[in-house]
Image (cartoon, helix red, strand yellow):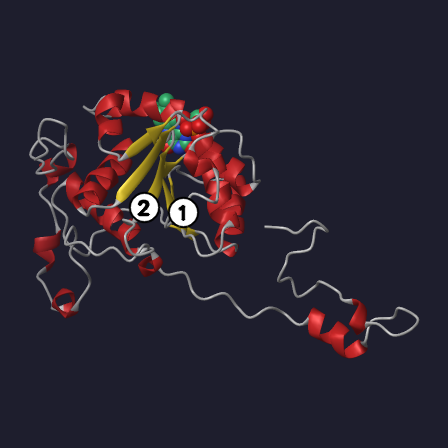
């Protein structure tokens, strides 16, 4: 909160009359002190949620393929008793309908609270509403560009902008596009340099996935890791992985590639979830 003269009450840059000489020049010792860099902020920690308040995350789902990643994340966060504040972009709603067996109402019902993307007066539009971070999964390249340039003209982008401006609030992005052009890469690099965690939904093979749901859960688990949330969703790398295995166990039969004899399972559907 700023004071009437525009200086922060505890600002190290606030000058006082006692620090100047008769000519009004600032004492060099004070000048050097004011130029000193502030002590680094403590490392962000998810454990800093105030006692009595549940862990609280903002979840944005935008219009990139892979809406099921956001849906699965919401399911798992609900199981972990994490309070979720969900925003779906209009294109995300299309992707949910096109790609999954879910409808938008069912997805919204997974969250503690949900908002329209045009709802710029929502609580999550303000930094004074305390949250423990935000994830956008999947992240479209359109929203990526806006977030990188601070364009908060919808609620997903505004909430991301707020997350970036507040100290100690992790922003995790799950960008989805392939291949990536130089604009996408530059936007991701710029945000990464600001401390944003970029978790692309890359395929993973070291844990021997046998179903699509394993790939989905692996990405969700890696997102949760960034917030210090531990789950048994995926197999973590460990000594057992380094044991030598016969090559044949890593090779699928040829007809499996066509999907005809595939063991690839579908991710959770509204009907199949417990
Ligand atoms: C089915 C479908 C899949 C799409 N997949 C992607 C994608 O993987 N990555 C991407 O950046 N845009 C994708 N798009 C295009 C975006 O939805 C589009 O750029 C949109 O304006 C993004 O708006 P939003 O960021 O507000 O959600 C897809 C669109 C549709 C309809």
In three-dimensional space, the C-alpha distance between marks 1 and 2, rounded to whole angstroms, equals: 8 Å
Q: Is residue 101 toward the left or the right of residue 11 in the image?
A: left
Q: Is the residue marked by circle 1 packed among few (<14), some (14-19), or many (20+) residues within 10 Å?
A: some
Of pointers 1 and 2, the one earlier in the residue sequence: 2
Residue 157 in the figure: left or right of residue 16: left
Foreground: 101 or 87?
Answer: 87
Q: What residue is rendered at 8% in x and 54% in y?
A: 249
Instruction: Give x and y (percent) for residue 241.
Output: 15, 64
Q: Residue furthest right?
A: 23
Query: Which one is nearer the viewer's eye here, 171 or 68?
Result: 171
182 or 257, nearer to the observer: 182
Q: Which mark is residue 56?
A: 2
**Ligand 1 visible in quadrant:** top left
Give the image location of residue 137, x and y in percent: 34, 39
Q: Quadrant of the C terminus?
A: top left
Residue, disc 1: 130
Which residue is rendered at x = 39% and y = 25% of the image? 116
| Quarter location, residue 217 | top left
Q: Is residue 213 left or right of residue 12?
A: left
Mark 2 falls on what kind of element? strand
Determine whether the residue tagged by mark 1 lies in a helix, strand or loop: loop
């Amino acid at each position: 909160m700023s004071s009437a003269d525009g200086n922060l009450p505890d600002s190290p840059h606030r000058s006082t009359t006692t620090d100047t000489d008769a000519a009004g020049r600032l004492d060099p010792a004070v000048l050097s002190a004011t130029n000193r860099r502030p002590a680094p902020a403590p490392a962000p920690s998810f454990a800093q949620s105030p006692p009595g308040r549940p862990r609280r995350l903002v979840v944005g789902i935008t219009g990139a393929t892979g809406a099921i990643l956001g849906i699965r994340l919401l399911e798992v966060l609900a199981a972990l008793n994490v309070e979720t504040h969900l925003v779906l972009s209009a294109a995300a709603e299309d992707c949910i309908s096109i790609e999954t067996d879910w409808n938008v109402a069912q997805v919204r019902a997974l969250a503690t609270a949900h908002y329209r993307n045009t709802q710029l007066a929502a609580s999550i539009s303000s930094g004074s509403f305390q949250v423990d971070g935000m994830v956008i999964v999947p992240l479209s390249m359109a929203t990526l560009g806006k977030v990188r340039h601070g364009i908060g003209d919808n609620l997903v982008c505004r909430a991301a902008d707020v997350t970036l401006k507040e100290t100690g609030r992790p922003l995790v992005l799950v960008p989805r596009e392939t291949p990536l052009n130089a604009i996408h890469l530059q936007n991701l690099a710029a945000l990464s340099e600001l401390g944003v965690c970029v978790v692309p939904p890359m395929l993973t093979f070291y844990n021997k996935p046998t179903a699509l749901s394993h790939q989905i859960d692996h990405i969700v688990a890696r997102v949760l890791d960034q917030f210090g949330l531990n789950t048994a969703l995926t197999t973590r790398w460990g000594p057992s992985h380094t044991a030598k295995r016969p090559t044949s166990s890593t090779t699928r039969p040829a007809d499996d590639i066509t999907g005809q004899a595939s063991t690839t399972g579908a991710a959770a559907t509204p009907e199949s979830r417990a």
